[in-house]
Image (cartoon, rainbow, N blue to C red):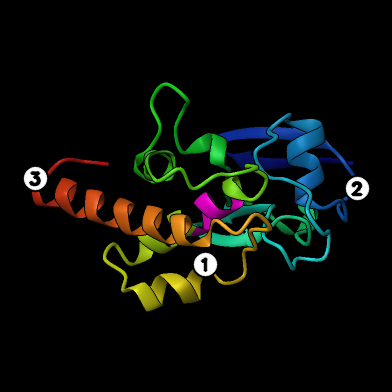
C-alpha cells in the first residue's frame, strides 16, 4: 500500500503496510538512520523523533496512523557542518559516549526547548527521563540541555532567529 508521509518538510510516498512502525520506514525506506532501534517496546527512547513537535518513540508509531502529521528526525535539525543549537551543545558538552542514544536524547531535548525555552533542572530531568543512556552520560546530557537553553535565551535576547 502506498502511504504518503511528510518527513523533515518533504512528502514521501512509501510502499508499506500501515502497521509498519515509523522507525522501520525512516531507516529502511528513507535511509534516515539517526533514530536507532533500541528495545522495540518504547522503553528506551533511542528511536525518538518528533510528530507535530511532540517527542514520540517511533518504534511504536504505525506509519498508517500519521495521516497529515509532520515528522522531524535528528537529520532535520542541522548538519555536521552547521549543527543546530541543541546538537552543538551536545557536542560541546561531549554528551555522547557510544552515541547510540544521542539522536533520541537530542530530539527529546529539542521538543522540551521548543515548548519551554528556559526549563528548570527539574523540568529537564523529568522531560528527559523516558530516554535511557546505557553509558551513563546523563550528567553531560543534562549540561548539554542547560547549555542549549542558555544559548537559545541569548539568541532570543539578541533578536536572532534560531
In the rendered structure, are the residues bearing label 3 and label 1 in contact, judged by CB atoms less than 8 Å apart? Answer: no
The residue lying at 37 percent from left, 40 percent from top is 92
Q: Which residue is mark 1?
A: 128
| First to last magenta residue range | 104-108
Q: Earlier in the sequence, mark 2 or mark 3?
A: 2
The residue lying at 88 percent from left, 56 percent from top is 19
Residue 153, x across and y down, in percent = 19, 55
Instruction: Name the quadrant containing residue 150.
Output: bottom left
* 29 is higher (above) or lower (below) than 37: above
Q: Earlier in the sequence, mark 3 or mark 1?
A: 1
Dot label at residue 102: none
Give the left or right position of residue 139, taking residue 25 as reference.
left
3D distance between C-alphas at marks 2 and 3:
48 Å
| Foreground: disc 2 or disc 1 | 1
Residue 35, x across and y down, in percent = 68, 44
| Foreground: disc 3 or disc 1 | 1
* 123 is higher (above) or lower (below) than 153: below
Q: Which residue is mark 3?
A: 158
What predominant SS class does the magenta segment belong to?
helix
Secondary element type, mark 3: loop
Q: Which residue is mark 2?
A: 17
Amino acid at each position: 500500500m502506498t502511504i504518503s508521509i511528510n518527513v523533515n518538510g518533504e512528502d514521501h510516498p512509501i510502499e508499506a503496510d500501515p502497521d509498519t512502525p515509523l522507525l522501520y520506514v525512516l531507516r529502511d525506506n528513507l535511509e534516515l538512520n539517526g533514530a536507532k532501534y533500541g528495545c522495540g517496546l518504547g522503553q528506551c527512547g533511542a528511536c525518538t523523533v518528533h510528530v507535530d513537535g511532540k517527542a514520540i518513540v517511533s518504534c511504536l508509531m504505525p506509519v498508517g496512523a500519521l495521516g497529515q502529521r509532520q515528522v522531524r528526525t535528528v537529520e532535520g535539525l542541522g548538519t555536521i557542518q552547521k549543527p543546530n543549537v541543541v546538537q552543538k551543545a551536545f557536542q560541546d558538552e561531549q554528551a555522547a559516549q557510544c552515541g547510540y542514544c544521542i539522536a533520541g536524547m537530542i530530539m527529546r531535548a529539542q521538543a522540551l526547548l521548543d515548548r519551554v525555552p528556559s526549563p528548570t533542572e527539574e523540568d529537564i530531568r523529568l522531560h528527559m527521563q523516558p530516554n535511557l543512556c546505557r553509558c551513563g552520560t546523563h550528567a553531560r546530557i543534562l549540561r548539554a540541555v542547560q547549555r542549549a537553553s542558555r544559548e537559545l535565551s541569548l539568541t532570543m535576547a539578541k533578536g536572532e532567529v534560531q
